[in-house]
Amino acid sequence: MQKKLILDSDLLAITLDRLCQELIENHGDFKHTILLGLQPRGIFLAESIQERLAIIRKKEIPLGYLDATFHRDDFRRREIPAKASETKVPFLIEGKKVILIDDVLYTGRTVRAALDAMIAFGRPEKVELLVLIDRKRTRELPISADYVGKYVDTLESQRVLVEMDGGHKHNKIWLINKD
């Protein structure tokens, strides 16, 4: 298995800061904006974005966790049933601007499922998508991100590994050949 480093911890920190600045440009005081991290791997990115925004804007932006497992179109097609993660949305999203946050945009199916799952909490005014890595040319559905950390050309035989756990010095993004 070959690994190629896409973003080291320093470049990842710069990328996250840039994404936060883009959010601030478009959402200003975040008065009617909430963040929703997609389970399981998007929550670490969402928490990091929320922490950075709180420091810059000097206010906390509401953050929830959304699991779309049971809304996936391949839920019953898997050999091993997918395990659901916690959904924690302690607020209504009715009339709010929602920023869905995930680590990697691949086929678009997870985002489609998340849109279905999100409707259980109200009808948002607007939904935007923030992803750390956009795997170009792999979309199966017409979904694109509004905020992208890095675009990466990948082959079907490759996968993107995001190592984010809160210990910022150890956070890295890898491109892995599945050979």
Image: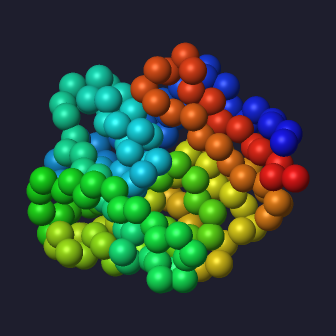
- The residue at the point 29 percent across, 23 percent down is 55
Q: Out of 69 and 110, give the one closest to the viewer.
A: 69
Tell whether 134 sits left or right of 124: right
Tell whether 26 sits left or right of 134: left
Residue 91's x, y, as percent?
A: 12, 56
Residue 60's x, y, as percent?
A: 19, 34
- The residue at the point 65 percent across, 36 percent down is 173
Quadrant in the picture for residue 116: bottom left
- The answer to whether one can see residue 11 in this image is no
Q: Out of 89 and 92, give the one closest to the viewer.
A: 89
- The residue at the point 12 percent across, 63 percent down is 92
Q: How many marks?
A: 0
- The answer to whether one can see residue 87 in this image is yes
Above or below, 17 relative to 178: above
Above or below, 70 relative to 152: below
Locate the N terminus by quadrant.
Answer: top right
Residue 136's x, y, as percent?
A: 72, 61
Above or below, 68 relative to 89: below
Q: Out of 81 and 40, give the one closest to the viewer.
A: 81
Above or below, 132 relative to 122: above
